Amino acid sequence: MSDPLIDRYRASFPQHPARRTHEPLDDSKLRKLSEQIQWTGKHPGTPMPSGATVRFATLADPQDWVLPRQAPTSMQQQFQVLKRRELERLAKIASEPVSLQVPQSAALPSPAPSSMQQQLEVLGRQERARWDKIVDELWRAEQTEYDILWQLYERMVTEEYVQLATPNASWSAAYKEFEERGGLDLYRSLRPIYYRAGVRQPHKFIMQMVSSNVRLGGVEVRQGVHPKFAKILERVDRSINRSVIAQFGIQPVRYIGCFRPSPLGDRISNHMIGAAIDIDATIKSADRNPHLKRPQLEALDEMLAFRFKEASQNPNPLVAPGPKLTASGSWLAGVPNLDAIDRARALHAQTVAISKEAKAFLDEFSINGSPSRRVRARALVRGAR
Amino acid sequence: MNAFQIIEKLAKAFGGQAGLRNVQKGGIISIPLEVFEALASDGDLQSGTQYDTSKDIMHFEVRRAADIIGGERVSIARASVCSPKPCTEISPAETESQNCSAAFAARQPSRCDHRERASVIARAGVTAAPTPQLSTSAAPLDAGKLSQVIEHQAATLLVARSHGAIVGMLTLAR
């Protein structure tokens, strides 16, 4: 699978006449930069200075290794081998003919240098200055290529989002979610998260989301669903025991949402790939299926402990005492050997039991979410004691 | 803690009086058993009530996101991190974090053990295929030998996958 950013970069040379004078980045560097930009969603920064030493650089080719037939047996011998090689290298350099071109324009310092050594130092400085200029130009040219690659990435992301915005497309519901939550900026921030999760072209992935004909329990699943997940939901929908629902006239659910462009921190969520549903989550007047996090679980556990204590102190002779419920921790920890259906029933039963306890507690001690007079009075009495 | 303090704590946790009023009115679940059961008992789905650290009652999701995303990249999965305890004792959250080599662990936790996992890898043919390239005399690993490697406390087996298929393995010993 080709990388669209690399394709765009390569296409920029024939497309723009001015680019013909530019030196393209080599393939290896281009691949790394493309991966870096798409992985982070950030500008790749500046090229490494040409004089910098790279640690863990590529090892020399094995053919170039020159090793003695037998390994030296001691540090002393190793040192002697290295010393001999260094002397051989220096002798080779010394034997090479010197062809030093002295430029006519070389401005010699005034007064004239007193020795040959000083003349050589001056020439060396001039040569270094010339090379530094060339290296600077090369470095700036590379920096320009980095900037161009980044601009191409930004343009690519914008064009991807424009493709998502196609009116009346089958993925319109998914696009609408982006529009409502932040538009292009949101897509730009989420693209690297998709990329890191293995979705190389997020816009094409999102364009797979279907937004019609996916139903569960008689209710349309909204906001877009991935086709693979839609098949799972169809299977689940077929397995729902409709006769019970029809018999008792239960309204199964009111709203089911699927695709939602919101990550889990910096990780991809199942909603982002259209592979998770939330049931009755967006009905604000009766938000009855909450996501219970630590504070809610702790508060519920306090309430459950209170209810259990009250029930054990004042037992009802007509009702068998129930087990002590807890909201925190695994709800299946005590019953690990259940089959799939029993496990599902146990989870539902636990939720319903906690729900009933919460309602009963609030009915007894609260009016519209605030403590009732009886509770206030009891608290005051206890405080007075 | 008395009822007054508990109500205060509940109100704080559920977003004030309005949130608590909703709980008082409708409880914390509106999903009928039939719908919940059909969703939570499906082998490819899991309920948000199965999380250990939170309980997302409204939420049902696919067990393995990789099944939806597909395999564009070679992913490295640690296969032996679960060796200290049988797979049946691993919670769904742990299974997810380990990204166990066999999709087995997530799909059929009751039937999964290390030997079976090893046999899944052995059946994939990856253990037999590269052995002749590495050694002319060593016999290819069978499921039993591979199982010994995976079960050993000192060994960590890394499995490389491409498009879901196992394409390579690496054993690290510590």
Image (spheres, helix red, strand yellow):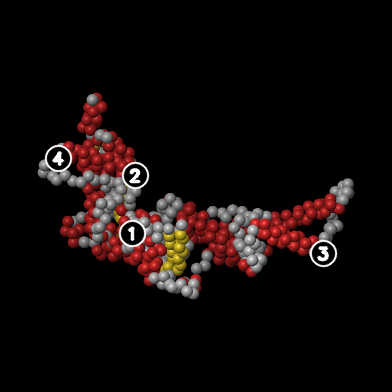
- Dot 4: chain letter: A
- Dot 1: chain letter: B
Q: What residue is disc 1 on?
A: B87
Which is more foreground, mark 4 or mark 2? 4
Dot 1 alpha-carbon crowd within 10 angstroms: few under 14, some 14 to 19, many 20 or more: many
Say which mark, if any, is on residue A294.
2
Left or right? Give the position of A238 relative to A270.
left
Q: Name the one closer to the observer, A41 or A90.
A: A90
Q: What residue is disc 4 on?
A: A315
Q: Name the one closer to the observer, A168 or A62.
A: A62
Asked if marks 3 and 4 touch (Cβ < 8 Å), the reply is no
Q: Is residue A31 visible?
A: yes
Are labels 2 and 3 on one chain? yes
Q: Residue at x 62, y 67 (%)?
A: A62
Q: What residue is disc 3 on?
A: A97
Q: Which mark is first along the chain, 4 or 3? A: 3
